Amino acid sequence: MKLVIVRHGESEYNKENLFSGWEDVALTEKGVREAKMAGRTIRCQKIVFDHAYTSVLCRAIESLQYILAEINQEWLPVDKSWRLNERSYGALQRLNKAETATKFGKERVNHWRRSYDAVPPMLDFSDPRHPVHDRRYRDVDPRLLPGGESLKTTLDRVLPYWTDRIAPHLIAGENVLLVSHRNTLRALIKYLENISDEEIVHVDIPTGSPIIYEFDRQLNILSKEEPDAQEMER
């Protein structure tokens, strides 16, 4: 059974060098091309999927839709969950990354961004950027909605969904497609590959580049492949 994970294509905030987190921003034209290229790369693998998962943020949803169209599996059941959202960057959301580094210091901002357990400045419940004010989370216990997260607490959020909703399909021998976000996928990769807190700092995931895992029935990784999109096109 196979798990294919893809980070969404370039978003408007990626292009503008802004912290996105739980902000809902669309794909750029480049992001659309990246999502379509990811789909063509996956199509070359000839994987027939049984389920697809994504977050409730449009950049991931749109990327998944483009991928499904490219692999001719638009009929596939799709589950969307807030637990697959990007890491919340708290009060840094909507801010320019370079300007934030100038204000707080490059080392401090890099520590917030890359380390495993550092938490950025938190959003207060009264801040309109806090997810308690977004109707898509109205059925979620407000105590579960983050005002800011570390990579560690992002994994704490993602792991129950992985265990309860995604992993059982792999154990049953089914193939799964997951389109999500940089830090959500970094957190999941840390768990799947048992990467240390120190080493995860050096792991990054580019936009629109599929990673293919093959598991046995005990969810041991048999193989990991990162097919080159340009090679697939030749």
Image (cartoon, grey):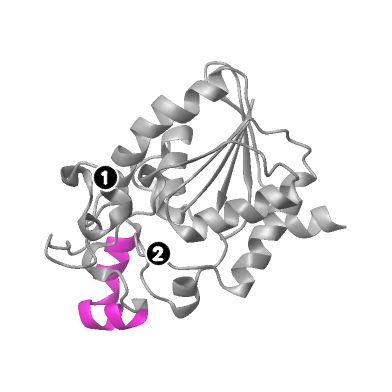
**Residue 186 in magenta?**
no
- Locate residue 26 relative to residue 146 in the image: left or right: right
Pointer 1 residue: 153
Answer with the quarter of the image where residue 228 lies. Answer: bottom right
Answer with the quarter of the image where residue 230 lies. Answer: bottom right
Q: Which mark is residue 117?
A: none
Q: Between 96 and 24, which is closer to the camera in this rendering?
A: 24
Could you say where residue 20 lies in the image, as x and y percent from the top left?
Answer: 37, 66
Q: From which residue to which does the magenta span run?
A: 98-113
Q: Between 184 and 12, which is closer to the camera in this rendering?
A: 12
Pointer 2 residue: 24
- Locate residue 16 relative to residue 217 in the image: left or right: left
- Asked if 131 appears above or below 145 in the picture, the reply is below
x 48%, y 26%: residue: 167
Could you say where residue 85 lies in the image, as x and y percent from the top left?
Answer: 39, 51
Could you say where residue 81 lies in the image, as x and y percent from the top left?
Answer: 40, 43
* Label 1 or label 2, whichever comes before in sequence order: 2
**What amino acid is found at the position of numbered circle 1 in the picture?**
Thr
Could you say whether the residue bearing mark 2 is in a helix, strand or loop?
loop
- Asked if 226 appears above or below 127 in the picture, the reply is above
**What amino acid is found at the position of numbered circle 2 in the picture?**
Asp
Could you say where residue 54 lies in the image, as x and y percent from the top left?
Answer: 49, 46
- Asked if 202 appears above or below 83 in the picture, the reply is below
Which is the main secondary structure of the residues drawn in magenta? helix
